[in-house]
Image: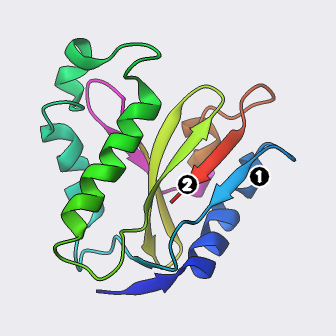
Amino acid sequence: MVAITARTLRQQINRHLADYLAAGRSSVIIADGYYTLVDGSAIDIEWILQAVRTDPIISPSQHGHVYREDLFDCDDYVLYLRNKVALYIMGVAEHPLALGCILTRKHAFNFCYEGQGTLHIINTQHTPDVVTTCEPAEFEKFLDMGAGNRIDLVYV
């Protein structure tokens, strides 16, 4: 399994997301020193997407049953997925997975770093299926960035 330093992960986050951070108000928190890449050696992006699709709490088919605005909504979905994967990865990797959360003023997303410059953004709470993009040209639209919506927090 390939591990990267927190510094490398921060550089990749800044490379991909710096244009969308709220000037003077955003926080980028890198909590650990090393991270396992989402490159298929332990977990790949398809594993993460399948974890969402099949989860009894956050799968798109369950949104009508579990979702409660301001009680269990988008930010809770992304934290739930991050914690679920963190518990799994403890048994297979030496370092936490490069999987984190992006909180904008309007919505929350998961993201993961695959290596080779590839950052995936995941809309965990999208219906009828979880959606993702790894195309930087699509990030602005995918995140619904605009004057009234910037990234307030990136946490991994």
Q: Is residue 46 visible?
A: no
What kind of residue is marked 2? Tyr
Residue with the mark numbered 1: 19
Residue 52 place in picture, x, y as percent: 23, 42
Q: Residues within 10 Å of mark 1 (few under 14, many from 20)?
A: few
Q: Are marks 2 and 1 in contact (CB under 8 Å)?
A: no
Q: How many marks?
A: 2
Q: Quadrant of residue 12?
A: bottom right
Mark 2 → mark 1, Cα distance in angstroms = 17 Å
Callout 1 secondary element? helix
Colour logic? rainbow
Q: Residue at 26% x, 66% y: name it.
A: 44
Vertical position of residue 22 compared to residue 36: above or below: above
- In-image side of 105 versus 83 (left or right): right
Give the extent of the magenta segment: 123-137
Residue 148 place in picture, x, y as percent: 77, 25
Nearest the eye: 152 or 150: 152
Vertical position of residue 90 compared to residue 120: above or below: below
Does residue 156 belong to the magenta stretch?
no
Residue 147 place in picture, x, y as percent: 81, 29
The rendered magenta stretch, by its main secondary structure, is classed as loop
Outermost residue toward the right? 24
What kind of residue is marked 1? Asp
Callout 2 secondary element? strand
Q: Nearer the viewer, mark 2 or mark 1?
A: 2
Q: Residue at 54% x, 38% y: name it.
A: 142
Residue 5 place in picture, x, y as percent: 53, 84
Vertical position of residue 125 compared to residue 115: above or below: above
Tell me the tag on residue 155: 2
Nearest the eye: 71 or 54: 71
